[in-house]
Image (tube, helix red, strand yellow):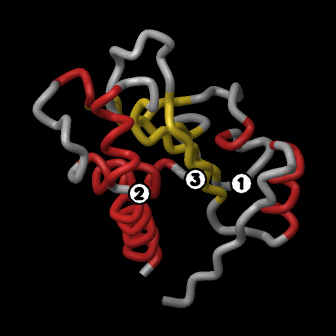
Amino acid sequence: NGVTVYRNRSSGNINAWLSESNYVKSDLHLAIHSNASGRGSARGIEIYVDKATSPSLSIATNIYQNLYAIYPGQNIPYTNRGIKYADGSLGEANDAFIPCGTLIEIAYHDNEEDARWIVENRETIGKNIASSIINYYN
């Protein structure tokens, strides 16, 4: 599909990862995490961009809508966590550090239902994100 993917070294740190993305002039810096609430009761997906005017907002919205469409907790209103604004607090989603960055929090690993969904659907989740990106750029 004409997409080149670069993967950071997991032994690095956020500054190195952002520098690598900038060095290769990536069109999109995508950080994929699972979330934690500390209580085990929170659920859902959320995606961070820097602010409402960020270049990454439209692709993040596209990824969110497609990912939430396969999320099993859609019938629970509080799981529709949506797009959040980091306002400079997250390196991966900070327009001053990375031109087009977004952070995906794929459900909560400290919630039993969410953790099970993540583990049992890693390939489906990955393909969903990949197809969202490909469809956005094509």
Q: Label 3 sits on what residue type? A: Pro
Q: Which residue is mark 1?
A: 99
Provide the secondary structure element on which disc 1 rests. loop
* Label 2 sits on residue: 122
- Residue located farthest toward the top when viewing the structure as drawn: 39
User: Disc 3 designates what residue?
Assistant: 55
SS at circle 2: helix
- N-terminal of the pair, mark 2 or mark 3, is 3
- The location of residue 137, given as percent across then percent down, is 47, 75
Name the residue at 50% across, 30% down.
Answer: 35
Amino acid tagged 1: Pro
User: Is residue 21 or residue 107 the one in the foreground?
Assistant: 107
Tell me: 84 left or right of 71. Answer: right
Q: Amino acid at mark 2?
A: Arg
Q: Position of residue 134 (x, y in %)?
A: 44, 76
What is the secondary structure assignment of the residue under circle 3? loop
Q: Are marks 1 and 2 in contact (CB under 8 Å)?
A: no
Residue in the image at 74% along x and 37% along y: 91
Name the quarter where the C terminus is drawn.
bottom left
Q: Residue at x 58, y 53 (%)?
A: 55
Q: Is residue 27 above or below residue 30?
A: below
Mark 1–mark 2 Cα distance, whole angstroms, equals 28 Å
